[in-house]
Every structure is written in structure tokens, then in C-alpha cells.
Amino acid sequence: MRKIAVLPTLLTLGNAVCGFAAIVFASKIDGLATQSDVNFYLMVSASLIFGAMVFDALDGYVARLSRTASNFGGQLDSLCDAISFGAAPAFLLMRLGHQDWAGNKLVLKVYAIVATLFMVCAILRLARFNVENTPDPAGHKRFKGLPSPAAAGCIASLAILRADPFDGWTYLSNDAAWAFVRFWTPLGGLLAALLMVSRLSYPHLTKQILRGRKPFRHLVQVLLVIFAIALAPELTLFFLFWVYALNGPVRHFLYRGLRPSPVPARPHGLDEAPRH
């Protein structure tokens, strides 16, 4: 390897920097921090994971425009993704457990197991992707298994919801929102980990949303999503990532349930009229 694409490489490394910074801010959450500080660190850590997603999307886009996609770029991208979408959300998941279940050793052990499993599954997911796919970003139409950025987004959206749950939504108290996040976080983390290493099919949303010509209603839908994020980012991000994550298993089981069972073939000559 003598030459590398500078701009896509810098964007990919920006992904890793965001992931490392997310771990740094999540590590500041401890028993001595005030609630306002905890909320701030949760918001910043989760936002940095979302920032890593932006860098992850841009490096592939720039590599495709400049026609500089390479095996080096693909390997580097996976190494950075392992930090930003494997280690960072797993560590954030553990900090959420220590914040909400401090003193409960059994629950903290469950959080530690789920966080470790999440990181391991993210690494396995990335390694399988490298083996089964080409380095050209344009060739990725659908994914086998939940993409690691989407799984990390599921955890980050829970952290944001925990930091500022249902802000301004008076029909549901903050206590109820916190209770929901506390009990869903370990279950959701386990589910996201297993979905990453599944063989369920997931669409490539970036290509479906931005690439090619689309009907006018498509633009209206995108604008409505942007408006919803601006109006209630905590709720909207949570629903967007978890609806996408759960779309795979729901579609799979619905397809299996609605697909007609095959009719067994009858033995040859069984349906023929008797001969005299």
C-alpha cells in the first residue's frame, strides 16, 4: 500500500475520535456527580455517538464520489466502528446501569454481561460484514443483521431519553419515563446485540432516502421526520432507531406466518384414473 485517500481516511478517523470522546464523557458519570451533570454527560456522550454516525456516512459518500474506495478504507472503517458503535455504546450502557441501579450487584452484573455481549456482537457483525461484502460502498443495498451504527443509535437514544425524558410532554411523568428506560435498557441492549449477529435483512436507509430520484411524497416524509426531530428529539430518535431495529424480526415473523405452507407433492400416478 503506497497511496491512500486522505479525505475519506480523515473522516473515518473522525468517527473513531467521536467514539473515544463518547467513552471519556460517559466515564465522568459516577456517584459524586450531580443529576444535572449526569444528564449533561449522557447527552454529550450520546450526541458524540450520533456524530460518529455522521462521519461514518460521510466517509463512504466521499469515497464513492472520489472513486477511492479500497480494502484499506474498509478495514479502517471497521476498526473505527468497533470503537464508536461497539465499545462506546457498551460502556455507555454500563454507566446507565451504575446510575440507575447503584448498589444492586445482581442488576449491575446483568448490565455488565449485556454490555460485554453488545460489544462482542458488534465486533463479530463488523468482521462478518468485511468477509461477505465488497469494499465499494455503492454495492451495499441491504444488510444481513442489524447494522452496528443503528444498534449504537438504539443505546444512544435511550441515554438521551434518560437524560431528558419526555421533556415538555405533560401527559406522562418523568418518573414513569425513567422507570420505562431503566427496565427497557438492559432488555433492549440484549435484543440489539442479538439482532446484530442475526441473518435478518435490513435496508440501507441512506441509499433509500438520498439516492436517486424520488416521488414528491418522499420529500414530504423526510421533512416531517426532520420537523419531528426538531420538535421532540428525545422521543423521535428513540422511535426512529427502535422501529428500524424491530422492523427486521417483525417482518420476518409476519412473512413466515403469512406465507402459505407448501403442499406436499402427490406420488406419481396416484391421481390417475384406474386402467382396465
Image (spheres, rainbow, N blue to C red):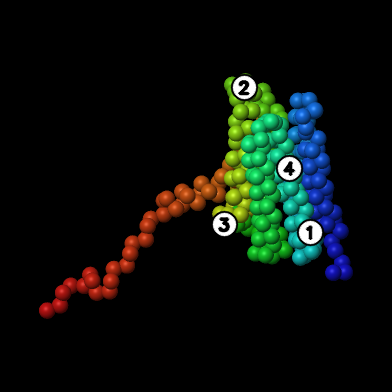
Asked where in the image residue 43 lies, by quadrant, the reply is top right
Horizontal placement of 262 versus 268: left or right? Answer: right
Indicate the quadrant where residue 46 lies.
top right
Can you say whether 261 is above or below 108 in the image?
below
Label 2 secondary element:
loop
Question: Earlier along the polypeptide chain: callout 3 or callout 4?
Answer: 4
For disc 1, the neighbor class at 10 Å (few under 14, some 14 to 19, many from 20) is some
Residue 203 higher or lower than 110, as above or below: below
Q: Amino acid at mark 1?
A: Leu
Q: Mark 4: which amino acid?
A: Phe
Q: Mark 2, residues whose alpha carbon is within 10 Å: few (<14), some, or many (≥20)? A: few
Q: Position of residue 87 (x, y in %)?
A: 74, 48
Q: Secondary structure at mark 3?
A: loop
Find disc 4 in the rendering and name its residue.
91
**C-alpha gap between disc 2 and disc 1:** 44 Å
Callout 1: helix, strand or loop?
helix
Q: Do residues under tags 3 and 4 come within 8 Å of each other at their CB atoms?
A: no
Q: Seen in the image, is 65 located left or right of residue 196?
A: right
| Residue drawn at (68%, 42%) of the image | 112
Q: Residues within 10 Å of mark 3 (few under 14, many from 20)?
A: few
Q: Nearer the viewer, mark 4 or mark 2?
A: 4
What residue is pinned by disc 2? 173
Q: Which mark is residue 212?
A: none
The residue labelled by disc 1 is 76
What's the CA distance linking mark 3 and mark 4? Answer: 26 Å
> How many other residues sit within 10 Å of disc 4, few (<14), some (14-19) or many (≥20)?
many
The residue sitting at the left extreme is 276
Mark 2 and mark 1 residues within 8 Å of each other at the beta carbon? no
Q: Which residue is mark 3?
A: 199
82 w.r.t. 130: above or below: above
- CB-based contact (under 8 Å), mark 2 and mark 3: no
